[in-house]
Image (tube, rainbow, N blue to C red):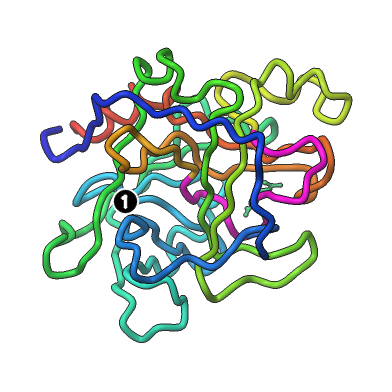
Amino acid sequence: MKRFLFSSLLISLTFSSVSFATDKIVGGELVDPAIIETNYIVSIGGGCAGSIISEKWILTAAHCQSIFNKAITGGSVDLKSPKRIKLEVKKSYIHPKNNSRTMSYDFALLELKNHIDFKSTGLGAIALVDPELANNGAIDEGVNATVLGWGTTSENGSISSMLRKVDVPIVGYERANAMTSYNGKIDASMIAAGFDNGKKDSCQGDSGGPFTVVASDGAPLLVGVVSWGQGCARAKYYGIYGNVSVAHPWILETLSK
Ligand code: ARG
């Protein structure tokens, strides 16, 4: 538990009424390799991603479980880099309330065989949002969040070998549900994010990866796990993320085993 990062700092709420049109995740941009803050993202089997949350644990999506036995690598924005560090899984844990049909509680924890040496590898852990921070506005409607991934850059596009990121505002799940498109499919174990007119989103291959907000000290805080969506970046079909604050008690319990 001590190895586990917490941020007791308040979140600086960034309301994104302005969006910066860049390029491509969908509608995002390339991640600057010099920015060390993205050293917690790992690729899982080339088809999913995950976040390092301590020297021994990765948080990802339950629906990625068929590829948990495939290569897990981190340490470079470039999936093709020979310098990527390989991590081996000892055991995986699926959230007990996970429902693969409804996508409810789409969380999995991967216990690693060996502790990651953050110093020698350059890898790092991202702090989790806890329920208290969530209650204090960390995941309120309008908060600007960032998604990272090697997923496709359009709905039927191909996987990106370079890490990309995109900023999307959080949409309250009640409002997201009220949209005819999702019609009650979003429950409290999920967070919706995106723009009413679409255009920016996570997409296939981004699943399991980090959905973060910026804490007041500038450090990213993991608030969601890429989970599902109807297509990608479609108008009124927001991207849906597993709500990490809801999974927090299970994460603590599993990590203390
Ligand atoms: N289920 C997808 C995956 O396995 C992630 C889809 C996210 N979709 C979205 N529109 N945000 O990679």
Q: Residue at x 27, y 55 (%)?
A: 90
What secondary structure do most residues of the magenta stretch adopt? loop
Helix, strand or loop at mark 1: strand
Q: Residue at x 21, y 37 (%)?
A: 5
Q: Which residue is mark 1?
A: 52
Q: Nearer the viewer, residue 243 or 193?
A: 193
Residue 85 higher or lower than 48, as above or below: below
Amino acid type, mark 1: Ile
Q: Residue at x 40, y 83 (%)?
A: 81
Instruction: From the top left corner, tell me how far across and down residue 105 is, in percent.
Output: 53, 29
Range covered by the magenta-colored residues: 193-210
Rendering quarter of residue 226? top right
| Horizontal arrangement in the rendering, residue 165 relative to residue 119 (left or right) | right
| Horizontal arrangement in the rendering, residue 10 relative to residue 48 (left or right) | left
Instruction: From the top left corner, tell me how far across and down residue 46 is, in percent.
Output: 52, 69
Residue 119 in the magenta stretch? The answer is: no
The residue at the far bottom in this view is: 82
Rendering quarter of residue 204? bottom right
